[in-house]
Image (cartoon, rainbow, N blue to C red):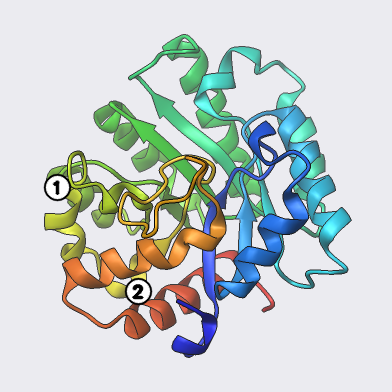
C-alpha cells in the first residue's frame, strides 16, 4: 500500500521512536514510513528523560522530514513512581517546545502496577491539570483501570481541550463511556490480532468516524496480518496501512474513507501543519 492509494497521507498518532529497538535505524524507519504513505508521526513520551529524547529526535530529523515529526510530553503510569514536586514544572517547560502537541502519555495502569496506584493517580491528575492550563490535548493510557480512570476524567473533562484514549483494547461498555466523555479513540494493530482483537473487531464500527484515529504504537503490536511477515517482530510506522485495512474491513468502509477521515481528525486534534 502506498500514499498514492489515498487522498491524503496517514497520520500515526503513537510511535515510541525513542525505544532502543530503533537505535541506529531511525532514518531508515522514517524513510520507510514516508514511502508507505505516512505523512506525520506523533512520538510518544513516557518519562521526563524520554521527553527530552523525543524532542531531540524531532529536532534532528525535522529538516529532512519537514512537518513529519511531532511529540508528546508527559509521564506514563509505569513511571509515575518517579513523579516529584518539580515534575509538573519540567513537563510544562518541555511542552512549550514547538514540536510538542499533547500532554502524555498519562493515565492509569492497574494491570502491571509498575508504580503504586496512589502515585499513578497523583501523576495523572497533575498532568490533566497541566493540560488544562496549557490548553493542550491529552494522550491517554489505560489498562484494567477503566472505572477509576473514568472517575478522574469526569472531574477534569470540562477543562480539557481534547483527549484521546490511545491503543484502545477495552470492551463496548468502556468504549461508550469514553465516547460519552467526548474522547477520541486510537486504534492499533490490536485489531489485526485474530486471537486477542475479536472484541475490538466487533465494536470498532461503533466509533464515530470523526472520533477515530490510527496508530502503530511501534515497536509494539506488530499487525499479525502483515504479509509477507517481516523477519523482525519490531513494529514500525510503515506498517500503519495494515491497521488501516483492518479498521476498514471491520467497519465495512473503504480504506480511502478511513484514511481521509482519520488524517483530518488527527490533524485537527493535534493542530498539525502537514
Percent position of residue 87, x then y: 73, 25
Query: Does residue 201 appear left or right of residue 165 in this picture?
Result: left
Q: Residue at x 66, y 45 (%)?
A: 17
Percent position of residue 4, x then y: 52, 89
Percent position of residue 225, x then y: 30, 56
Pointer 1 local density, CA inside 10 Å: few below 14, some 14–19, many at least 20: some
Of discs 1 and 2, which sits in the foreground? 1
Q: Residue at x 34, y 42 (%)?
A: 154
Q: In the image, is residue 115 above or below residue 5? A: above
Can residue 212 be spotted in the picture? Answer: no
Frontmost residue, 263 versus 97: 263
SS for callout 1: helix
Quarter of the N terminus within the rendering: bottom left
Q: Give the quarter of the image for residue 126.
A: top right
Frontmost residue, 52 versus 27: 27
Q: In the image, is residue 44 above or below residue 136? A: above
**Residue at image mark 1:** 198
Query: Does residue 173 appear left or right of residue 112 in this picture?
Result: left
**Residue at image mark 2:** 210
Can residue 138 be spotted in the picture? Answer: yes
Image mark count:
2
Quote the CA–CA distance across marks 1 and 2.
Answer: 23 Å
Q: Residue at x 24, y 55 (%)?
A: 180
Q: In the image, is residue 143 above or below residue 81? A: below
SS for callout 2: helix
Q: Residue at x 74, y 44 (%)?
A: 54
Query: Does residue 193 appear left or right of residue 202 in this picture?
Result: right
Percent position of residue 112, x then y: 38, 16
Quarter of the C terminus within the rendering: bottom right
Amino acid at each position: 500500500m502506498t500514499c498514492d492509494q489515498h487522498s491524503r497521507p496517514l497520520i500515526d498518532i503513537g510511535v515510541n521512536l525513542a525505544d532502543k529497538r530503533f537505535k541506529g535505524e531511525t532514518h531508515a524507519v522514517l524513510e520507510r514510513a514516508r514511502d508507505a504513505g505516512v505523512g506525520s508521526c506523533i512520538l510518544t513520551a513516557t518519562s521526563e528523560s524520554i521527553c527530552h529524547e523525543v524532542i531531540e529526535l524531532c529536532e534532528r530529523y525535522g529538516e529532512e522530514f519537514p512537518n513529519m515529526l511531532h511529540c508528546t510530553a508527559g509521564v506514563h503510569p509505569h513511571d509515575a513512581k518517579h513523579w516529584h514536586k518539580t515534575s509538573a514544572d519540567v513537563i510544562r517547560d518541555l511542552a512549550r517546545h514547538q514540536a510538542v502537541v499533547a500532554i502524555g502519555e498519562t493515565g492509569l495502569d492497574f494491570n502491571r502496577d509498575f508504580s503504586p496506584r496512589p502515585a499513578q493517580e497523583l501523576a495523572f491528575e497533575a498532568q490533566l491539570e497541566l493540560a488544562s492550563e496549557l490548553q493542550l490535548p491529552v494522550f491517554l493510557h489505560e489498562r484494567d483501570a477503566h472505572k477509576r480512570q473514568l472517575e478522574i476524567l469526569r472531574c477534569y473533562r470540562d477543562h480539557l481541550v481534547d483527549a484521546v484514549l490511545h491503543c484502545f483494547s477495552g470492551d463496548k461498555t468502556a468504549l461508550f463511556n469514553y465516547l460519552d466523555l467526548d474522547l477520541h479513540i486510537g486504534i492499533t494493530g490490536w485489531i489485526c490480532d485474530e486471537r486477542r482483537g475479536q472484541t475490538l473487531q466487533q465494536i470498532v464500527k461503533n466509533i464515530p468516524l470523526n472520533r477515530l484515529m490510527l496508530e502503530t504504537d511501534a515497536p509494539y503490536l506488530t499487525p499479525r496480518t502483515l504479509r509477507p511477515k517481516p523477519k523482525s517482530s519490531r513494529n514500525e510506522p510503515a506498517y500503519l496501512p495494515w491497521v488501516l485495512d483492518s479498521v476498514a474491513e471491520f467497519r465495512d468502509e473503504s480504506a480511502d474513507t478511513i484514511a481521509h477521515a482519520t488524517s483530518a481528525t488527527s490533524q485537527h486534534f493535534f493542530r498539525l501543519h502537514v
